[in-house]
Amino acid sequence: MTTIRRFCCNDLLRFSSVNLDHLTETFNMSFYMTYLARWPDYFHVAEAPGNRIMGYIMGKVEGQGESWHGHVTAVTVAPEYRRQQLAKKLMHMLEDISDKIDKAYFVDLFVRASNTPAIKMYEKLGYIIYRRVLRYYSGEEDGLDMRKALSRDVEKKSMIPLKRPVTPDELEYD
């Protein structure tokens, strides 16, 4: 049985095996601690029996006005636990928090343009490619900014794709 719970400080010492996937971004400890302190509702871990970490999701809420949105900073599942819809459950949890608690207009995420399995999964979850960000990953690989409108965005304005790619310096950050 899988347990999904809030991420805690001790998990930082136990989750490195989940990050071994070459497509998963690994950050420094202070980055994870900042998310844990500022957006604890957006940071969850999935555990298998025996307290083995299966995967996690880390995100935040940011923006202003109609750009107020939930953001998926990282979602990853250990290879041995994939294809069990765990990422889907974690994504739905973050979407529900963004929609019902923080009243966001949409949820967005960035994914490597080469990560076809993840792109297909996100599309099945209702995300669209909003824009391409040139050289987003380490100044080398393009990223795709994918979005899913939430209930507050009745007209689905947040999902109207941009017609041209952008560069990382054109992105708006909070």
Image (tube, rainbow, N blue to C red):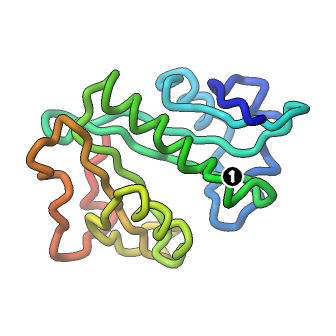
Percent from the top left, x then y, of residue 78?
A: 75, 54
Question: In the image, is 173 to the left or to the right of 153?
Answer: right
Q: Residue furthest left?
A: 155
Pick the quarter of the image with the N terminus.
top right
For label 1, count other residues whose C-alpha is less than 10 Å away and answer few (under 14), some (14-19) or many (20+): many
Q: Residue at x 72, y 24 (%)?
A: 9
Q: Secondary structure at mark 1?
A: strand
Please tell me whether residue 4 is drawn above or below residue 119 in the rendered image: above
Q: Quadrant of the C terminus?
A: top left
* Residue kind at label 1, given as amino acid type: Val
| Residue denoted by label 1 | 77
Rendered view: 70 above or below 171:
above
User: Picture quarter containing residue 7?
Assistant: top right
Task: Give how far across and how far down residue 137 sits, in percent.
Answer: 50, 67
Report the front residue among 85 and 46: 85
**Is 10 placed left or right of 88 in the picture?**
right
Q: Residue at position x 31%, y 64% from top? A: 128
